[in-house]
Image (tube, coloured by chain):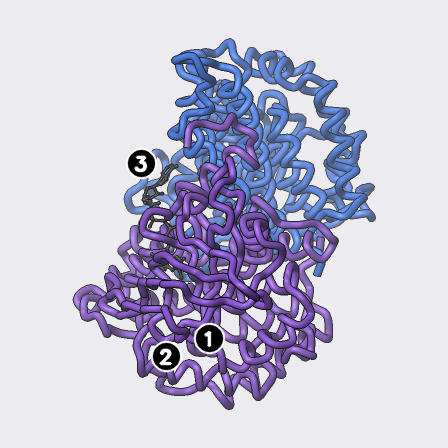
Amino acid sequence: MDLTHTADEDAFRAEARAWLRAHVPHPPPPSLETAEGFAAHRAWEAELHSGRWSVVAWPEQYGGRGADVFHWLVFEEEYYAAGAPGRVSQNGIGLLAPTLFDHGTQEQRARILPPMASGEVVWAQAWSEPEAGSDLASLRSRGVRTAGGWLLSGQKTWSSRAAFADRAFGLFRTAPDEDRPHRGLTYLMFDLKAPGVTVRPIRRLDGKPAFAELFLDEVFVPDEDVIGEPGQGWRIAMSTTGNERGLMLRSPGRYLAAARRLVGLWRATADPSDTALRDRVADAVIGARAYQLFTCAGASRVAAGSAIGAESSLNKVFWSEYDIALHETALDLLGAEGEPADGRDGWSEGYVFSLAGPIYAGTNEIQRDIIAERLLGLPKGRR
Amino acid sequence: MRFLPTDEQRAFTRSLHTMLRAARPPAAARAWAAGDPAPGRAAWTGLAEAGVFALAVPENHGGLGPLPAELALAFVELGRHAVPGPVVETVAVAALLTALGDPAPAERLLPGIAAGEVMATLRLPGTGPYALDADAATSVLVVDAAPAVPGPGSPGDGGSGSGSGSGSGSDVKGHADASEGAHGGDHARDRNGTGTGTGKGTGDASRPGPKAARPPTLRIAPGHGPVRASADPVRRLSVPQGGGEVLAAGPGVAAAAATAVDWARLATAAQALGTGLALLDRTVEHVGRRAQFGVPIGSFQAVKHRLADTLIALEFARPLVLGAAVSMTRTDIAAAKVAAGEAAYGAARAALQLHGAIGYTEELDLALWLRKARPLRDAWGTPAQCRAAVLRP
Ligand SMILES: Cc1cc2nc3c(=O)[nH]c(=O)nc-3n(C[C@H](O)[C@H](O)[C@H](O)COP(=O)(O)OP(=O)(O)OC[C@H]3O[C@@H](n4cnc5c(N)ncnc54)[C@H](O)[C@@H]3O)c2cc1C
């Protein structure tokens, strides 16, 4: 059992730190959930890419550094410690790219990954539908076979940043007569500016137009934009939600940096006799360390050749609840200064965003079902 | 980085698990609670033969250690199997004597600890008046933050020599944070002063305040007061008598006591983690078997989600415990103690609730783990004390 970094990891850390110090914009760009912020964040992706820092874990041929998971963890620590901007390409990098690595063709990887790495093409996730949220497999948007491809019709919703993004990936029903809902689904990619696509932005709880509804009316998708075999979409989609994503969706570096900022705020502002508040600050430190060490153990297992699987559900519930508690504590420390939406150090903004954590990426109720049934082996109930 | 138990470590915990299952610790724990330590002593010998206590003892004193990572893994198993006795305290004594670096007391007790012949218990300032299982222990060690009025010849046999509970109890209370003193400098000294002022003051009124800075002492208590049942009857509490032979005195004792607290916290955290894991295992088994409304109660979502939350808490406490054993920093150890203590206590609450009335009986072995979770959460550092330690710069 060992927690030391290799000399190479230390050198990598030093290199990342130096580059970030020279390049991270101050003050930070406007929120990436707005039109102007989106453009600024796209430019930041290009800058990251020019230093080959946008996708460190990818192979070099696609713009990465071939970094292993430990190097990736080091990079993420440095990234958040430097106060660098949020990642506008994260749904592409975190969700579509792993799917292409596992299930895509060589041609798809060569065509799609480099512009994703540079921010030239930003991707949106189009999975959810008005009638298909937690019960994603009940989705109804369909793909109908046509010469050389598919015609997509139906409605998708809650697609993050689709109002500004270039392309989207999602699941479509291509064989409507299968006996089980998750059969007959196909994983496809489409252009958000293609004829037949209507994008309607939806304002979120934070007032930002960062979600969108997508209306699709016979949108043509060529065969080269089908991922894997038609009809295999469910298996392909699920293999990447329970895999790298569990480890990589939220890196420990993010919470280590946030906990450090919280302690700083507490030392600067708190009444030392308020031990109730002190205990919550301590819990933020403890939680960030727990998440870091949990991830180190998971990374060590991945490096030793095992898959993560249903364990990623432990992760999801933990970080999403942790994030809310951390921000609540910050707001309590700030008092009246915590109320303005553009309040100090982004705590208020971060708080409102944290509230969505237990909902997206599979609600925490669904995660707890997965934990109970797959990790504890409890009997399946009605769902 | 390879933050996983090695094959060797895995084999060690597996063999410990097999050995403990055969030793039937629940029966030993019940006998222990009834005042019959013989089966518990037999289990102790088995643990010593497996090398568990030697992990806390340096090689030059007959041990294999110090090997905190292996020790933490072993203590998870001790918790899982509800092993009775002052296991944590014996490890803490080993750490204290090792840190003290004084060859005479070290050579006197450490080889015996490694061999399983010494079953030690310990009371430090700031952790309450009681020592655990002093009636069964072969050596009862006490650190006094500042000795009572020194008598001629022996600095240890002063005012609290009656051995009555209240005398030494208030002595400890008066210095409620002496062990933290070694951690936290003037912070603790302030609270120390307050403690003296508001303490019960039995026989303490004329004593000089802590600012008089008398050196702390380590002594072997000559005996102990009456045994009081803890809420966990397997944990037998008594107040060590005053007086007895002084093994060491001076500021080194305070530093060594702080190290002993670290080891005690780590071992308790690991034991708590094992306790929580055992509670979860047993409860999962129960809810899969017990049927109501025609289906296993484990198919109800309220039941599932409670157990999922229990698993999350335990699975995030585990890397903290093992990480603390690797880093051995005071902050990591305190963090592990909070997380494992709270996770195990949460597991106990869930286990009781989901067993229903059968869980609220002494007959079911479940009670052995249920009743241990709360004291382990608080032993050697309450959650509040440990949270404060996490933030201490
Ligand atoms: C900020 C944010 C960003 C998002 N981004 C995207 C995106 O980019 N692309 C995309 O496709 N989607 C996105 N989503 C949508 C997200 O994936 C869905 O919100 C999520 O899957 C839940 O679906 P739902 O909202 O329809 O809720 P519902 O499924 O209707 O659930 C409502 C409540 O009922 C509970 N519930 C449902 N079924 C069960 C059950 N069997 N047992 C117990 N409780 C149950 C849920 O847990 C939840 O609490 C985003 C959502 C948010 C909030």
Where is the C terminus of chain A found, in terms of image quarters?
Answer: top left
- Position of residue B342 measured from the top left corner of the image (x, y, whole percent): 45, 39
Q: Which residue is mark 3?
A: B200
The disc label shown at residue A38, or none: 2
Subunit of label 2: A
Helix, strand or loop at mark 3 = loop
Q: Is residue B272 above or below residue B46?
A: below
For disc 1, the neighbor class at 10 Å (few under 14, some 14 to 19, many from 20) is many
In this orientation, which residue lies closer to the viewer: A275 or B302?
Answer: B302
Q: CA distance from mark 3 to mark 2?
A: 65 Å
For the image shown, how many numbered marks are present on the structure?
A: 3
Q: Is residue A294 visible?
A: no
Mark nearer the viewer, 1 or 2: 1
At a point 35% along the width and 86% down the height, the residue shown is A27
Q: Could you say which is closer to the camera, residue A288 or residue B186?
A: A288
Secondary structure beneath dot 2 equals helix
Q: Which chain is purple?
A: A
> Badges 1 and 2: C-beta atoms under 8 Å apart?
yes
Estimate the x, y position of residue A151 in percent, counting from the top left: 46, 62
Q: Which residue is mark 1?
A: A122
Give the crowd class for mark 2: few <14, some 14-19, many >=20 residues within 10 Å.
many
Shade representing chain B? blue
Residue B109: numbered disc: none
